[in-house]
Image (tube, rainbow, N blue to C red):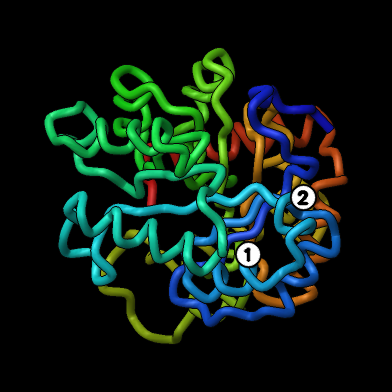
């Protein structure tokens, strides 16, 4: 397995991290198992997660790397004011029973915040000066936003989605590595790609309204092609291993809703793809998805 280049200020013993997927109910047993297995990067944005961590023994809590994301209102309609962000930070610290976290990330900031046209960027920097965090970062979703962050916003951490079906940001990984920033990757491989019988949606017995394959049809086709490329019907471990194979990636946040998912993710972190398999998966995206993304 490639060893990522992680800044010396960031101590994380395991490349797998924990974050509660949006919309999922908090499962204390899943987090407890993650910590027991030496997972130390914990996203405490979720209030129940923060409260659980705050209840851990102090010596164990001090071993964890704790990050929190802030930015938008809960319904996603409003970029929050600085006083509201301060309130959220204080609430998280109170739940954690701490005076600081390891990292604070702006979650999907608007363009104005990225380029410094609002006071938010200066406020984020001020959290370091007041010792509420050691590191600051940003979570982005698109290539253009990531490129802008790399050009305009000095940060310690960057979080984004990356998996075999969305490799759009991969060309910029080399710059993240050169800047010695910690790259945190969300790889939600249970969001419909690898669960359920997609093939059932391909042939319905009804006349199609379009000659273009529907999204479920494309998913079913691509999953079958990936099984051929990887020579296996079990895709979860090799596709997560593909994410780990990128040496710019420091932490991977896989879906950890069940014990089975947790142990698959753990196995993936210790599994190495061949160079040919990795190359084939990169070619798969470039030839079949890049120019017609979902």
Q: Are discs 1 and 2 less than 8 Å apart at CB? A: no
Q: Earlier in the sequence, mark 1 or mark 2?
A: 2
Residue 11 location, quadrant: top right
**Numbered circle sitting on residue 255:** 1
Looking at the image, residue 271 sits to the left or right of residue 12; the answer is: right
Q: Name the secondary structure under disc 2.
A: helix
Which of these two is toward me, 249 or 60? 60
Q: Which quarter of the rendering shows the C terminus?
A: bottom left
Residue at the image point whose x is 58% and y is 31% from the top: 182
Residue at the image point whose x is 71% and y is 58% from the top: 61
Taking the view exactly as shown, the residue that stands out farthest to the top is 178
What residue does disc 2 label? 238
The answer to whether 117 is drawn above or below residue 209 in the figure is above
Q: Nearer the viewer, mark 1 or mark 2?
A: 1
Which of these two is toward me, 262 or 27? 27
Residue 154 location, quadrant: top left
Looking at the image, residue 144 sits to the left or right of residue 19; the answer is: left
Provide residue 117's location: percent of width, then percent of height.
12, 30
**Measured Cα–Cα span from mark 1 to mark 2:** 15 Å
Residue at the image point whose x is 35% and y is 49% from the top: 107
Crowding at dot 2, Cα within 10 Å, few <14 / some 14-19 / many 20+, comes out as many
Q: Name the secondary structure under disc 1.
A: loop
**Numbered circle sitting on residue 278:** none
């Amino acid at each position: 397995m490639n060893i990522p280049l992680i800044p010396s200020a960031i101590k994380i013993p395991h490349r797998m991290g924990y974050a509660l997927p949006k919309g999922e109910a908090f499962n204390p047993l899943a987090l407890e198992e993650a910590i027991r297995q030496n997972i130390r990067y914990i996203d405490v944005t979720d209030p129940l997660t923060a409260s659980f961590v705050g209840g851990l023994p102090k010596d164990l809590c001090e071993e964890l790397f704790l990050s929190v994301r802030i930015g938008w209102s809960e319904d996603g309609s409003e970029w929050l004011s600085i006083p509201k962000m301060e309130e959220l930070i204080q609430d998280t610290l109170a739940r954690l029973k701490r005076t600081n976290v390891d990292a604070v990330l702006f979650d999907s900031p608007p363009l104005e915040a990225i380029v410094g046209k609002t006071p938010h960027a200066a406020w984020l920097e001020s959290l370091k000066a007041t010792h509420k965090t050691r590191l600051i970062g940003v979570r982005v979703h698109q290539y253009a936003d990531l490129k802008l962050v790399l050009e305009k916003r000095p940060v310690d951490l960057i979080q984004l989605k990356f998996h075999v079906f969305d490799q759009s940001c991969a060309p910029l990984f080399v710059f993240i590595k050169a800047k010695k920033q910690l790259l945190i990757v969300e790889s939600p491989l249970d969001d419909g790609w690898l669960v359920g019988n997609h093939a059932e949606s391909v042939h319905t017995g009804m006349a199609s309204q379009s000659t273009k394959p529907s999204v479920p049809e494309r998913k079913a086709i691509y999953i079958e092609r990936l099984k051929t490329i990887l020579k296996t019907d079990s895709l979860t471990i090799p596709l997560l291993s593909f994410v780990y194979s990128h040496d710019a990636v420091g932490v991977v946040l896989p879906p950890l809703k069940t014990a089975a998912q947790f142990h698959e993710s753990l196995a993936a972190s210790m599994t190495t793809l061949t160079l040919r398999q990795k190359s084939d998966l990169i070619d798969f995206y470039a030839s079949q998805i890049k120019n017609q993304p979902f």
